[in-house]
Amino acid sequence: MARNAHAYALSANDLLSGAQVFWSTNGGWSTSFDQALFSQQSQALEPLGTAEEAANRVVGAALIPVDANRRPIALRDQRRLQGVSVAVRTTDNERSANANTAPALARAA
Amino acid sequence: MYAYDHYDQTFVEQRAAEFREQIDRRLSGALSEDEFKPLRLQNGLYLQLHAYMLRVAIPYGVLNSKQLRMLGNLADRYDKGYGHFTTRQNIQYNWTKLSDVADMIDALASVQMHAIQTSGNCIRNVTTDAYAGVAGDEWLDPRPSAELLRQWSSLHPEFAFLPRKFKIAVLGAAQDRAAMKFHDIGLWAKLDAGGQPTYDIWVGGGQGRTPRVARLYQEAVPLADLLPTLDAMLRVYNLAGRRDNKYKARIKILIDEMGIEAYREAVDEELARIDRSVFATAVTEYQRIAAQFETAQRPALQGQAIAQESPAFHAWLQQNGMAHKIDGYAAVSISLKTKGAIPGDASGAQMRAVADLAERYSAGEIRVSHRQNLVLPWVKLNDLGALYAALVEQDLAEANIGLASDIIACPGLDYCALATARSIPVAQALSARLREREQRDGPIDLSLNISGCINACGHHHAANIGILGLNRTESETYQISLGGRADDKAKVGEILGPGFSQEQVPDVIETLLDTWQAHRRDNEDFSQTFERVGKQPFKEAVYA
Amino acid sequence: MPNASSNVAALDLGWLLQSSGAFSHAAVPTLDLLVEPEAADTLGLNNLLALKGVGLVFKSPHDGRSFSLARQLRNAGFSGQLVGLGRLMPDQARHAFQSGLDALWLEDQLVQRHGADAWQNALNVVVADLYSQQRLPLGLTERLALPDIWQRRQNAAAKTLPPKHCL
Ligand code: SF4
């Protein structure tokens, strides 16, 4: 595992939405990194990721090594946590508000 | 243009229903992720950093206004209000949910569109010249060939689980506007003495970790031999291509390793065994398809002088207009690279606006170019003024097609799970800086492309100035290469030296441009200057 | 039996899906040889042509070599039984049959996980049509009872239009 890793969080994509999720202190997945469970032992989290994938709840389970300030060590994890660098609509409310104004879609028979 | 008949429509609808059922089986656990992955990829669905991404095919880059309107509506309904046009005549939705995909694909099927084979290790969406059918230097419209290939390759029983992706481009003009020589197979269609199509087949081009310019495989292959030849070429690749290392799995590596002569021998052996009766219907099919494209052509117009317009109009027409095959028309590009924009992104509202303009001014037709812009291919000369005014109103009149600020960029580490660095913010900063420079000093005629990793979806190898985002000890660094080009003199760029930080990139690029100006003779293009003076002066200027 | 592979032949009871659509719990059909895709080159195509039954091994859901191997054998004139075995999924059944295989032999757990229905329906619910068809095995031809899309299209056009000269 990553050198200098102080601890690890477990992350994945939610199977249905594709959103990035973190294994939380509540014993389930959360979209908030603030609620992530940190463990000094990578071996404690790895089997959990495998089991959750096998249960078809998430895909792409992977550990996030963090430093003593719980900041991800890998550039990819840092950027992923920051989200996209451009302004986008962020909430589902905005999305459905827009969907209501968008012209209706034709559905194929 | 080509309209689906009942067979095509049924085919696409069946495929949509099949994928809906596959998604259900994935959710139930009947399909594991390992099994589902090739199936979803063949239907255009990736898993990225923050969501799924659906990549929709725009076959040979042609859209009608109804289709573009649907793409805009999908952007609003299922994405965050945007779609991203790619370098391979596709559009990507970056915020797709697995639970929405089947509905999106049904909506696409209702306007004769699909996402079939836009991803995965199969024969991908066939691309071509965005000016097909209207370019002044064209001798054969490549779109009927591309449509024939779409049909042949769709769900080809053998070639859905290849060692790696397989990209084909078709051209029918003197100038290469589709980066044909950077494809696994490039077809250069010509006419034989009897006026029938023949194809020069180029093989083994590609970018990525090991960039290669395609090599000529065979000249003047008659139409009747095209599909058997491609079948044999793909079969040898499917059987012998490497599967132990994804960076060595493309056909370019197979040909490097076995040599083009041995490859040719293996293909010939295969070809000798092929039952050609299977392809007996192909030539008639080609004629049926070609007839549809021909009837979509418009008659020449007389006496269409351009009325007096503003200097801004003339500058726009000069930069974004293209000489048309038929008198009385122009093909006009709409730049999706306004100052500071994300290259290739268009909002739902913009897509609907362009669809409206296409109906009013371009016979309802739109094209998508590999440089991530849109084209209105059928604008009457005396409508140009009105079109320009309408585009200005929509903020879509940036006059920078083919200039340095017309940057190609991939989604990079903002979205892409494979990325090593961000490319969008670099593109935005550069676009702002370079557009300003162009507006101050005049057009800068060169290509500038950015990729967020060595996979090179942003075509950085094939650009006069290429930028590659890398991860060096967990920080982003941008490596610059010079002298690449994607046209008929295709060439891979040379790496300049150590990389730069994101903040340094705009200044470095300006220094490179200053150096070019200082060494440029007469009207040399960038490649000519670069080939004459080499990279030394550029290196000295940048690393001084 | 001569064996270019090791593990698959150890199993003897499983499910057989035939191109005719027949689906039954059965022993591995009698095969003269099991061919793993890596071994095909060394074995040599011509040495296989006289055999009555050949098993083609699929090694992962991503590996389509055995589809091309089947087509290559058929093109070379192989007229015996071609049976696919290994890591297949129902969605690949049509690829197999359209590439010239006659049957798929599936381990129990594979049928269990995907569901017997998914396998049985593999040729009904999926896109069975192609634009240009390869030569299909007899069972499948009877089953589809339809030529490929290009052929059907041209047959339909011939009915509605006076015959036209091709180029
Ligand atoms: S070049 Fe790399 S970062 Fe950019 S889209 Fe392709 S794979 Fe992703």
Image (cartoon, coloured by chain):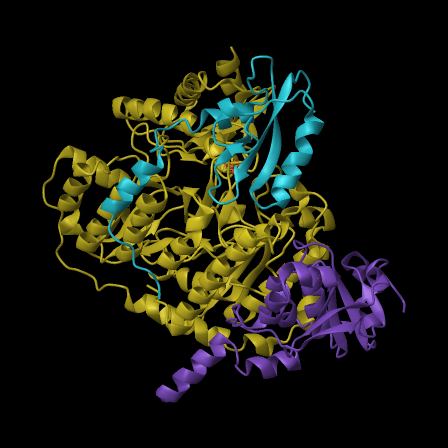
Question: Compared to B144, does C162 lie above or below?
Answer: below
Image quadrant in which you'd find residue C89: bottom right
Q: Is B521 or C43 nearer to us in this picture? A: C43
Q: Is there any visible trace of residue C165 in the rendered image?
A: no
Q: Is C11 or B349 nearer to us in this picture? A: C11
Question: Compared to B64, does B54 lie above or below?
Answer: above
**Image position of B528 (left or right of C85):** left
Outermost residue toward the right in this view? C1
Image location (x, y in percent) of residue B53 = 46, 44
What is the display colour for chain C?
purple
Query: Which residue is found at the position 47% from the left and 58% from the top?
Result: B20
Image quadrant in which you'd find residue C138: bottom right
Q: Is there any visible trace of residue B274 in the rendered image?
A: yes
Question: Looking at the colours in the rendered structure, which chain would you say is drawn in yellow?
Answer: B
Image location (x, y in percent) of residue A59 = 57, 41
**Image position of B91 (left or right of B76):** right
Question: Compared to B544, does B358 lie above or below?
Answer: below
What is the display colour for chain A?
cyan
Outermost residue toward the top in this view? B544
Image location (x, y in percent) of residue B211 = 59, 39
Query: Which residue is found at the position 47% from the left and 46% from the top?
Result: B179
Image location (x, y in percent) of residue B325 = 29, 56
Query: Which residue is found at the position 34% from the left and 52% from the top?
Result: B131
